[in-house]
Image (spheres, grey):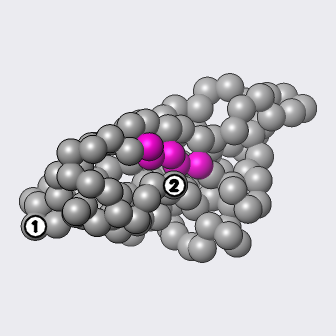
Amino acid sequence: MKSFGEFLQSGDWKGEKHVPVIHAPEKVKAGETFDLRVSIGDEIPHPNTLEHYISWVKVFFFQDGGKFPVELAEFKFTAHGEGGNFSEPAGATKVKLNKSGTIYAVSYCNIHGVWENNKEITVE
């Protein structure tokens, strides 16, 4: 049996329109709220049609020395337009962290599968 991890695809978001882009500071202060935004297709727009679209993005945080990641956010995109794009696959939330770690984002394209990206974040 295959592990789900074997299905995850990755790449440079500047050259691959499916990779989630994590917009967050590299350093934050412990316990202080910061803006976290995840988007798809920053450099190369991803289509958002009935035939080809990003269905969802999930965001997790894995704390340094932690045992399991925790889910920070889930964004679902249900407005797919025939003949045009009604929405862009992006979501935002506010986050507070107490320890450094890694933010992971996973996106799902109905044609090209599951894509991942990550960003380390330092908590001071």
Q: Nearer the viewer, residue 66 or 78?
A: 66
**On the picture, is 9 further left or further right than 1?**
right
Picture layout, residue 49 above or below residue 18: above
Task: Identify the residue at image location x=73%, y=44%.
Answer: 52
Residue 94 found in image quarter: top left
Can you give x and y, in whole percent of width and height, for residue 121 in the image?
A: 33, 64
Sequence-wise, which precedes: disc 2 or disc 1? 2
| Residue bearing the label numbered 1 | 65
Can you give x and y, in whole percent of width and height, for residue 3 in the image?
A: 30, 64
Q: Which mark is residue 29?
A: none
Picture layout, residue 92 above or below residue 115: above
Other-residue count near label 2 (Cα within 10 Å), few / some / many at <14 / 14–19 / ≥20: few
**On the picture, is 91 further left or further right than 101?**
right
Q: CA distance from mark 2 to mark 1?
A: 23 Å
In this orientation, does residue 4 appear?
Answer: no
Of badges 2 and 1, nearer the viewer stands 2
**On the picture, is 3 further left or further right than 85?**
left
Q: Nearer the viewer, residue 15 or 78?
A: 15
Give the residues in magenta: 35-39
